Image (tube, rainbow, N blue to C red):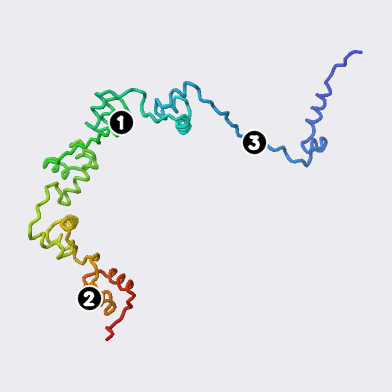
Amino acid sequence: MGRTSGPSLENKAAEYLAAKSTHEIERLTGLRGQAPPRRKTRARVLRAYRHWQPWELELLGKLPDAEVARQTERKLQAVTEKRRAIGLAYTLTDAKRWTDEELALLGTAKDSIIAKKLDRTVESIKTQRRKKGVPNYRQIHFWTKAEDKVVMSYPYKEAARRLNRTMMEIETRRRALRAGNTGKPARAWTAREIALLGKHTDTELARKLKRSRSTVVWKRRSLRIPAMGDYSRPWTPEEDQWLGTQPDAQLAPILKRGLKAIQHRRLKLGILFRLFRIQ
């Protein structure tokens, strides 16, 4: 029996459905009224644990953690945790040993300068210097009159360029010059000035002697001279009898004590305030 030619059943069904509307197709297929299929969301892909390779473990402790993280394409925190887990100390530079010539340079200049000269990091210089007990390099530079003239004559940026200094140094020096502190040695204390310590308040005496208040306080304390109105001196029985006879504010100049000190002493003794002395 020969096979008939012509469109197949599948093609006829496709032509039939193409002539129908979507509403009619849903009615014929029984899909009318059903909710559309929910869109599948992409599930979170969990990465498999990446085991440490032998060549990666060899880098730990020999290179900085940041460099190991860059070469192994791992996170810095993962490198640090792995190094600590296997008990390796943190090494800032490679395993290059320090020579006697390099150790002799520690403390002779700034750590940044020595780091560039030795081709090491600044942190490695600091660590090695502290390990050897070498103090930090501090260069004391005394300002000259010519430099002070440049500081006061040019803006901060221009003065810093001319003197090869930082803008912070220029600003600090300008403030010192405007305040009158030019780095001159402190003038010696005379016997007359020492005799006035403790007889006036530190602020009044500083204004009278044309000195700073901190200088007056330091000199008085070094000689163990109590300040005027010193609240730390012990109370006498005569002073205790004055408590409660007058307002505390009026007793302060009489007893040469502070208002808070008088209030604290009166409340400590349980003395109530009275306007007049009880005979």
Residue extending furthest left? Answer: 191
Residue 100, given in percent of the width and then of the height, sits at 25, 24
Residue extending furthest top? Answer: 2
Which residue is at a point 59% across and 32% down the rendered structure image? 46
> Is residue 210 shown above or below 102?
below
Which residue is at a point 15% across and 57% down the rendered structure image? 223
Question: In the visual, does 113 lie left or right of 206?
Answer: right
Quarter of the image that includes the N terminus: top right
Determine the image quadrant of residue 278: bottom left
**Mark 2 element type:** helix
Check if mark 1's residue and mark 3's residue have beta carbons within 8 Å: no
Residue under numbered circle 3: 41
The answer for how far apart the CA atoms under marks 1 and 3 are is: 55 Å
The answer for how far apart the CA atoms under marks 2 and 3 are is: 90 Å
> Is residue 42 shown above or below 220?
above
Which residue is at a point 81% across and 24% down the rendered structure image? 10
Residue 47, given in percent of the width and then of the height, sits at 57, 30
Determine the image quadrant of residue 134: top left
Determine crowd level at label 1: few under 14, some 14-19, many 20+ residues with C-alpha closer than 10 A.
some
Question: In the visual, does 75 lie left or right of 3?
Answer: left
Q: Nearer the viewer, residue 209 or 247?
A: 247
Kindly report which numbered mark, 1 or 2, lies closer to the viewer in this rendering. Answer: 2
Instruction: Give residue 128's mark.
Output: 1
Residue extending furthest front? Answer: 237
Kindly report which numbered mark, 1 or 3, lies closer to the viewer in this rendering. Answer: 1
Check if mark 1's residue and mark 2's residue have beta carbons within 8 Å: no
The answer for how far apart the CA atoms under marks 1 and 2 are is: 65 Å
Kindly report which numbered mark, 2 or 3, lies closer to the viewer in this rendering. Answer: 2
**Mark 1 element type:** helix
Determine the image quadrant of residue 232: bottom left
Amino acid carrying mark 3 in the image = Thr
Residue under numbered circle 2: 238
